[in-house]
Structure formats: C-alpha cells, structure tokens
Image: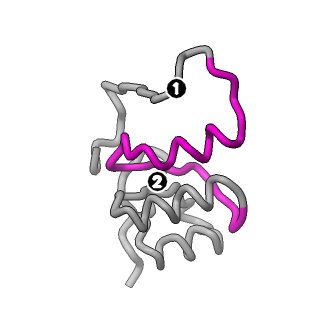
C-alpha cells in the first residue's frame, strides 16, 4: 500500500484457528508462513519477537515499513532502515531522507 496513507480495505488472515490462544511459539511460527509480502511495524527494540520477525522478514525479501517520528527517529529505526526497512509516518507515507 505504498503511499496510500489511509487504509480503506484491510484483510486479516491467519494460518491459526480464530480461537487459538496466544503463545510465544505461535507468534514466532507466524513469521515463517510468508502470508504477507509487506509488514508494517509500529515499534521494536533490538531484542524479542518483533526484532526477530522484522529481521526474518527482511532476509526473506519482504518489504518492511517501520513507523518513524519525523522529529526524533530512534536508534532502532535507524538500525532497521540500514538493514533495508522503509521509514513511514503515522499515515503510512514513506519518509524522505533529509539532505
């Protein structure tokens, strides 16, 4: 949804049954099924499931978008952008690098 800004149509799809309980194992397994070609990340640290999932997605060739504040992008955003993630604003618009 490059530069679409507002999401008008969203499909949520899962390989797990609707009433499956949340477990860390299922959360990590979800990353391996490749149901999405693009992944949007609200925030991450440099450890944990989100970090692992983003890095796995990047290694599988998925387009990763990560929310970055225009005023103060944090160190994690910079690390992920260096790895290939695309910084976006709160509306999903790609942020242009400052010259």
Name the image quarter holding residue 87: bottom left
Q: Which image quarter: residue 18?
A: top right
Residue 21, compared with residue 28, is above or below; it is above
> Which residue is nearer to you in this view: 50 or 87?
50
Taking 25 as reference, is 31 left or right? Answer: left
| Residue 71 in the figure: left or right of residue 87 | right
Which numbered disc flags the more N-terminal residue, 1 or 2?
1
Is 6 placed left or right of 14 in the picture?
Answer: left
- For residue 5, above or below residue 60: above
**Residue range corresponding to the magenta coloring:** 20-47
Task: Decide whether residue 6 is among the magenta residues.
Answer: no
Residue at point 62% right, 37% down?
Answer: 26
Badge 1 local density, few (<14 within 10 Å), some, or many (20+)? few
Task: Identify the residue at horizontal 52%, vertical 41% (top origin).
Answer: 30
Nearest the camera: 91 or 85?
A: 85
The N terminus, quarter of image:
top left
Q: Quadrant of residue 68?
A: bottom right
Image location (x, y in percent) of residue 77: 57, 68
Q: CA distance from mark 1 to mark 2?
A: 30 Å
Rendered location of residue 75, percent (x, y) = 65, 74
Q: Position of residue 19 (x, y in %)?
A: 61, 14
What residue is disc 1 on? 16
Residue 89 numbered tag: 2
* Residue that appears at 36% across and 49% down: 38
The residue positioned 50% from the left and 48% from the top of the image is: 31
Q: Is 94 placed above or below 22 here?
A: below
């Amino acid at each position: 949804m490059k530069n679409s800004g507002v999401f008008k149509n969203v499909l949520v799809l899962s390989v797990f049954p609707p009433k499956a309980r949340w477990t860390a194992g299922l959360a990590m397994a979800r990353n391996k099924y490749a149901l999405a070609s693009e992944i949007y990340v609200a925030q991450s640290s440099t450890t944990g499931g989100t970090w692992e999932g983003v890095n796995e997605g990047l290694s599988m060739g998925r387009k990763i978008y990560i929310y970055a504040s225009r005023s103060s992008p944090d160190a994690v955003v910079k690390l992920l952008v260096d790895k290939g993630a695309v910084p976006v604003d709160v509306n999903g618009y790609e942020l242009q690098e400052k010259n």
